[in-house]
Image (cartoon, rainbow, N blue to C red):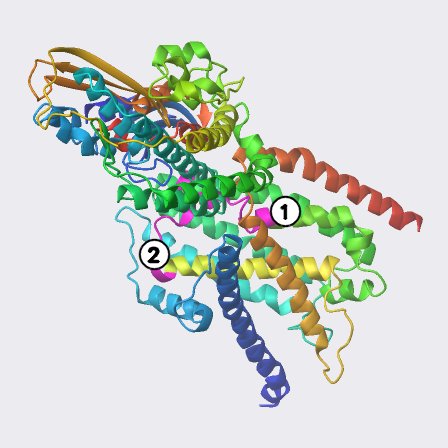
Amino acid sequence: MSMDVEILEDPKHHRYVLNMGPQHPSTHGVLRVLLELEGEYAMELLPVLGYGHRCHEKIAEHKPVKSFMPNTARMDYLGALIYNHGYAQLLERAAGIEVPERVEYIRVITSELNRIQSHLLWYGAYLLDLGAFTPIMYSFDDREHILDILEDVTGSRLTYCYFRVGGVSKDIDDKFVTSTRAFVKRLRSRFPMYEDLVNGNIILQKRLIDVGELTPHTCARYGITGPLLRGTGVAYDMRRAEPYSIYSKFDFEIPTGTKGDCMASFMVRFHELEQSLRIIEQALDGLPEGPIMAAKVPKKLKIPAGDYNSSVEAPRGELSYYLVSDGSDVPYRLKVRTPSYSNLSVVPEMCQGMLLSDVVSAMGALDLVIPEIDR
Amino acid sequence: MEIFYSLLPELIRMVVCAICGAVIVFGNALVMGYAERKLAGHIMFRPGPMEVGPHGIYQLVVDGLKLMGKQLVIPKNADKPLFMLAPLLAFGPVFVPLLVIPFSDKIQGFDHDIGLLVILALASINLLAILTGGWASNNKYSLFGAFRAVSQNVAYEIPMLLSLLSIVFMTNTFSLKGVVAAQSPVWFIIIQPLAFLIYLVALVAETNRAPFDLPEAESELTAGFHTEYSGMSFSLFVLGEYANMFIVCSVATVFFLGGSSGIPLPYFEYSGVIWFLLKVYALMFFLVWIRWTYPRTRFDQLMNFCWKYLIPFSLVNLLITVVMVKLL
């Protein structure tokens, strides 16, 4: 690769190149990062992408809009339902379909469960990066309950394809409601344990505080969204900034940090678990009866010519779909703006001059999902 | 012939000692390997090995056989002689320190005036093995692991020695048996709590275990210095690590926890062994416990902690000890 040669031919002889990935325990997938090291300090970083590219956007241009739904789940396998949500919403906006209220409630409940699941996995995996082996087992224990709940209603455990244009594929039942309520109670009771075991640990705090500091300005330059941006003190969350679905009905806070370092985004994500639980509780309380599918959804969905946009808050930041239609049932162009891609782009600047261990903790704080970047 | 017969008891003694040493090294690795996996499992709310034998007790035997059957992969550009030498260097010297450790007042390979020096000198060879292995692998991650191991162990040997030295000043002997005898009324952990704490921290760093497992930090350095090792050459490193754990914990027991002293059990002459092993394995349990609880420290923090806190404190402790010994 030409980039490799460029970085290798650097005349600064006392530096050398370390190839981190594509098979490295802490890159969580097929991300490759070239590090130019001076001792243990990373002076230059270069993320190399493209090991898992599947041309999702190009595929979208070749099939009817409705059939693209399963692909959305394959982009971010941890936030599949939220990706479903964004896409379903896009098509509903474009075709002018009214969604029944019960559907919106179901979508919010399952999306928030999905978000909690994603955060729990990040929590365990991040601590694994930092060398704590045990918390991942605890968080997976909790996560397993969500997977069971969602499996009952959606039929799959990871890459859900549950939402449809104008509705959802299957109605939720009493079992779903009771087990979700039980899960909310259970996760609440686990928070003190996480606080004691992990968040208050002095080693963890020393590893995260003042590492990988970001400012709102840097975030704006790179288009960083999600918990990283909120860690710098900007309360920007698509659920509030541009309330979609029925999020405006619920009472929840947007956790923010102040310093923008790894600890800030760590705590933001941790507090978001509680906020998601609050939304789920309120949604379960107010769950209305009704149909789970909009009345008139044509089998062959033709999108009127024009540009359409839909943005949702994915676990890692702002997710946008941008559709350009020429009036047929196949999109002229579908652009997906995934949060991890923008978040990764800050790595060369954020990690410059860091110790190797800090590079690992800073990249872990980005919570990268590689298939979302290489889509 | 005369000389032979006069030396015969000593020869038999040596052979017995060697066999006992091997039994301890392998037995300890089996017990600790199994105990660590089981304990880690229970700490994580999972059962640990369960398949081979009742509660998976044969798991380690099966693993050992598997490792023995595996191909030894030597990387193409590795320094072959050094690459092969490193595991032997890690594993070979662990037998000798076992000779001078007093398992009870009657069971000891041989009591030497400089017993402590023998242990410390031979324990440091392990470091050389890590450096050799890391260098010879010709892998950047291995090299990083080796560098980290060297700077870490060189740093932590100082507080370790200083804390033991304060005991040596009190007892006036390097002989381990003498140290055990000197704490017949009170254990030194009560008189020298600071030295014990310092030794305990240095011990974790010396054995390269979490939270100080930087030489093999797998989220940063894949597997650190043993990235390129496979099969038996890898397991020799592991055997050496467990044996080293046993040795440093034995030293802690001898110097701070009263060695083999304890309530004598009825009808059993060698009850000291039981007490000794109980104390050693209690310390080892502690090591396993913290390994599966804490995250890893960062390298500069680790070094700062040693040079800025442990060494000054151990020097102060040594100074106080010396003054007190002189006065009393």
| Near-viewer residue (A7 or A212) | A212
Residue A170 in the image, given as x and y percentages of width and height: 25, 39
The part of the image, by quadrant, that contains residue A72 is top left
Give the amino acid type for the residue marked by disc 1 in the picture: Ala
Chain under callout 1 = B
Toward the right, the furthest residue is: B328
Distance Cα–Cα, label 2 vs label 1: 29 Å
Q: Is residue A275 visible?
A: yes
Residue B74 rendering spot, x and y as whole percentages: 29, 53
Image quarter of the C terminus of chain A: top left
Residue drawn at (26%, 29%) of the image: A84
Which residue is disc 1 drawn over?
A: B202
Residue beneath disc 2:
B230
B278 shown above or below B218: below
Residue at 49% across, 47% down? A134
The location of residue A354, given as percent across then percent down, is 46, 25
